[in-house]
Amino acid sequence: MDQVQKQQNCPVCMEKMVKSVKTECNHEFCVKCLFKWVFLCVDEREKIDCPLCRQTVWMNNLKWIKPEENKEIRVESS
């Protein structure tokens, strides 16, 4: 089973991922879910952790996943 098939559902909302993003720890989430998590973390503390493994998530190191091409695109901070 390839990586795309393994990660069909977001581990946060359990829905099929349409637009997804991958963290440095290689966990994939819906863009919407991850950003909700980020805003929750920022409200409660300064450090942002992965919702699954609690490894630090650096926003400038997120990779956007294009499902139709199965390619990762690195997010560049401005």
Image (spheres, grey):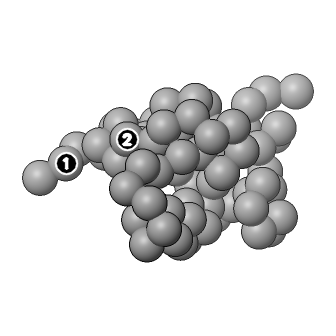
10 versus 55 height, above or below: below
Res 58 label? 2
Q: Nearer the viewer, mark 2 or mark 1?
A: 2
The residue furthest right is 1
Res 29 label? none
Q: Is residue 56 left or right of residue 7?
A: left
Across and down, in percent, residue 72 comes to 46, 36
Residues at marks 2 and 1, CA–CA distance in whole angstroms: 10 Å
Few, some or many C-alpha atoms within 10 Å of disc 1 (few <14, some 14-19, many ≥20)?
few
- Decide if residue 51 is in sight here: yes
| Residue type beneath disc 2 | Trp
Q: How many numbered marks does the figure carry?
A: 2
Which residue does the image show at 74% across and 62% down from the upper left? 12
37 versus 9 height, above or below: below
Across and down, in percent, residue 54 comes to 63, 40
Query: Which residue in the protein does label 1 denote?
Result: 77
Few, some or many C-alpha atoms within 10 Å of disc 2 (few <14, some 14-19, many ≥20)?
few
Which residue does the image show at 66% across and 51% down from the upper left? 51
Q: Is residue 39 left or right of residue 2?
A: left
| Residue type beneath disc 1 | Ser
- Secondary structure beneath dot 1 equals loop
- Secondary structure beneath dot 2 equals loop
Give residue 6's quadrant in the image.
Answer: top right
